[in-house]
Amino acid sequence: MPHIAILSASVRTGRVSHRVALYLQNYIAEQTMFSTELLDLHHYQFPIFDERLQYQKNPSPQVVEFADKILKADGVIIVTPEYNGGYPASLKNVIDLLYKEWQHKPLAVATCSDGPFGGTQVITSLAFTFWKIGAWLVPGKFQASKIKEAYNENGNPANKEASDKAAAGFLKELTWAMDLNSKK
Ligand SMILES: Cc1cc2nc3c(=O)[nH]c(=O)nc-3n(C[C@H](O)[C@H](O)[C@H](O)COP(=O)(O)O)c2cc1C
């Protein structure tokens, strides 16, 4: 069964984009065609990047575990908020930490804002960074706006039909790339 890791990027106190990560985890589990797990950067609490994992002499077990989970995932969904038009430092922290784990990795990005625009500006800088590191970012979009109104703390959507329709299109793009990658 193909495995999809969902990386929840916000470590902010009182964060709400994590609700979108929970929603996507539930949605994917409901499809029963994939195994899935949440990689929560708030849970990991990684220190600020000081060297790439491949050059660390004594990497922490948490970093090694995280890298292994990204490496073994058939596809990765990044759930990120928009901060000042870009993505959070917590996300840059783990992109730079790894290298081979990101290469040719089918990736989809769900952008989040509690405002009306769904964090759409994040993708400009994030797509460039993932292109530089050699990840395979698919064009599928999942743009979550007004999150506090749209999802409760468990990730249950106020409008399940609309959320599921958006998630289906998003997942279709990711799984297309995952299928192709599995044949290489
Ligand atoms: C430092 C900071 C900068 C923000 N900048 C933007 C922004 O540029 N565009 C936007 O739509 N929302 C912006 N917001 C609102 C966030 O998208 C909103 O707070 C969202 O809930 C953040 O996700 P989080 O709660 O998981 O941290 C900003 C929030 C913070 C804390």
Image (spheres, rainbow, N blue to C red):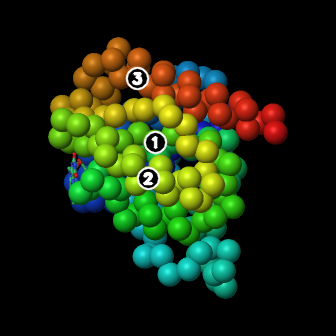
Q: Amino acid at mark 2?
A: Leu
How far is disc 3 from disc 2 in space, using C-alphas? 21 Å
> Which numbered disc, 3 or 2, marks the residue that appears first in the sequence?
2
Quadrant of the image occupied by residue 92: bottom left
Which residue corresponds to mark 1?
Answer: 109
Give left or right: position of 150 versus 49. Answer: left
User: Is there any visible trace of residue 22 in the rendered image?
Assistant: no
Q: Amino acid at mark 3?
A: Ala
Is disc 1 placed on a helix, strand or loop?
strand
Looking at the picture, how far across and down is residue 38, in whole percent?
Answer: 50, 46
Give left or right: position of 109 versus 12. Answer: right
Which residue corresponds to mark 3?
Answer: 166
Q: Is residue 79 above or below residue 66?
A: above
Q: Is residue 58 above or below residue 150?
A: below
Q: Residue at x 64, y 24 (%)?
A: 33
Quadrant of the image occupied by residue 3: top right
Task: Looking at this view, name the residue that lies furthest to the top.
Answer: 161
Are the residues at dot 1 and dot 2 in contact (C-beta closer than 8 Å)?
yes
Q: Is residue 174 above or below residue 14?
A: above
User: Is there any visible trace of residue 120 in the rendered image?
Assistant: yes
> Which numbered disc, 1 or 2, marks the residue that appears first in the sequence?
1
How far is disc 1 from disc 3 in space, using C-alphas? 13 Å
Is disc 2 placed on a helix, strand or loop?
helix
- Asked whether 106 or 53 is in front, the reply is 106
